[in-house]
Image (spheres, rainbow, N blue to C red):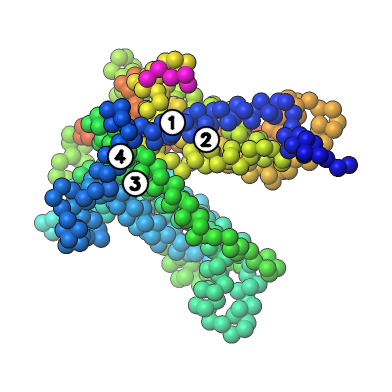
Amino acid sequence: MSLGPTGIKSAAWRFYKGRRLLLIAVWAILFSYVVYPALRTFLQSFLEAGRLSFAHYQSFFALRADATWSDLFQSWSWWDGSRVLSPGLQAMYGSLLVSVLSVLLAGLLGIPIAFFFERNAFPGRSLFAALMLLPLTLPPVVGVVSFDLLFSESGMLPRGLAALFGLESPPFHFSGRAGIIAVHGYAFFPFFFLLISNAIRDMDSSLVEASRGMGNSALKTFWKIEIPMLVPALFGGSVMVFMLSMASFSAPVLFDVDGMYLSTHIYNLKAQNLMPEAFASTTVFAFTSLSLLMVLRLLRGNTKYQPVGKGVPRHRYVIRTKLGRMIAALSGCAILFVVLLPHLTILLWSFTRDGSWTYQVIPPEYTLDNYVRLLGQGSAGATVFQPVKNSLWMASFATALNLLVGIGAAYVIKVRGTVGRGLTDLMVMFAWALPGTVIAINLLVVFNEPSWLAFGMNLSGSVFLLPIAYFVRNIPLIVRPLVAAWERTGEEVEEAARSLGSGRIRMLRTVSLPMIFPSLVAGGLLAFVTALGEFVSSAVLYSPQNKPISMAIFGEFHAGAYGLCSAYGVLLILLIATVMFLGRKSLQGPAM
């Protein structure tokens, strides 16, 4: 039966009234809290005293007063840029340089480690490989604090080496831009390790064997056959590390407080109440991040690196000699020790008496007072523990919103023939591409005055603005796993349930949710633990009434209370580990 224009139009919008309402609700929420605040910030950046002006952008992209292009070229340094540039351009260059070098360092660490564990079989290999993901359990601010206590000029390792070799000054230390890159390399190498390890396991060994059988050398086979099959994993790891490095805030603010980076530059403008300049810098930051993400996708192109062989996995090389197995196991232990150093440092320092460590290599006095203060009774204990309570309720509130909106958005994206699937997916990924500083400023623009999004209330300085920022930031963490789960299961089972007379609510409860339950739990856990240790948006939006644990760690560190700061860090790590353990137990419950 042929359809006229009216029939075609109605077929394009053919889904139940409930689905139509769901689409409208999802669009309204995503537009109101993700897109609309960004548009408001963009428009505000062109206003000066209520009039249209490009002055803030001119100052952002200009040279300093009385400087010439000749001065720029003469003073240029690839590491530091040039002080002739405006503060905004210096910040942009610093963020881009750190991001590129962080990708290189994370790749140089993660890729060889992945090959080492995936190409060789030796005692303890599986355990070592699993523990390589431990850096991901460190919240950003905790990881940076541990690195500072370990590797700064007064850190334990540089002091220890100086004392061991009788040197007057430490032989090395991490500070400034190099310290930021070192922190990023440690924190982000697991992304390369995880993706490359999976790619190596899935690699078709028949193509490698065919290449070697045709007389090609091992090096040529590696370059011509294996590397192309690793390109998707390399690209995925590079994009993730680059975007995370661009948005990084805790490492620059602790390791290079005088350096210029977009995230800290916007924070400093906001702290100085230079809001028009902050709006312009926020817009440039958002545009830069989105543009670079698109450029990276274009560089990846449409090339499909899909093997055409038999899909035979490559066997690991079994180290049979006793000496070889010992060397491999010792190498694994050495790598694991380096990976565990920040965790062990935070644990050690949590038992340190504040003020006791001055010139010694390691803290000389230890106590349980930090945990007594943190978990103690009375008004003092309640005050110290309050940031933990704040983080727990804000993370729970944000995650509940993420689950409600995430299920709806994922359902809209996965339904075939749904009008607006692409637009919904675009708005979801827009939230992921925006750095945390940008999201915080965007929300501040909208909610710094009575807003219809807050039922006419002004949320600036309230306890609710920060969990809203957590919610916006973590939307993709729920949506992407759910979409992938629904795509794997298909719609046939749901259609069968509908054909047997099951209502939409019953179908969702008995068919859809059980199928996606593992992905729902995984996404919810990831969103919760990310919100629990979130630092970037917290630094911009928190108020004394909802001070989160990340800001408590930051404040105690700057106050020199390293023991209490580390106790907060240990508690945060334990909370994250407990949540992840309970999540795994829930997945091992009733069969789905």
Tell me what residue is drawn at x 18 percent, y 39 percent.
357
> Earlier along the polypeptide chain: callout 2 or callout 4?
4
Residue under circle 2? 475
Type of amino acid at the residue the image marks with label 4 = Phe
How far apart in space, not on screen, are marks 2 and 4 (Cα)? 33 Å
Helix or strand or loop: what does disc 2 sit on? Answer: helix
Residue 107 lies in quadrant = bottom left
Nearest the camera: 564 or 55?
A: 55
Nearest the camera: 255 or 436?
A: 436
Type of amino acid at the residue the image marks with label 1 = Pro
Residue under circle 4? 54
- Tags 2 and 4 in contact by the CB under 8 Å rule? no
Q: Residue 18: where, in percent of width, then height? A: 71, 25
Type of amino acid at the residue the image marks with label 2 = Ile
Of helix, strand and loop, which mostly describes the magenta segment? loop
Vertical relation: 264 (above or below) 235: above
How far apart in space, not on screen, are marks 1 and 2 (Cα)? 15 Å
Residue 585 visible from this viewpoint: no
The magenta segment is 449-453
Nearest the camera: 459 or 155?
A: 459
Residue under circle 3? 342
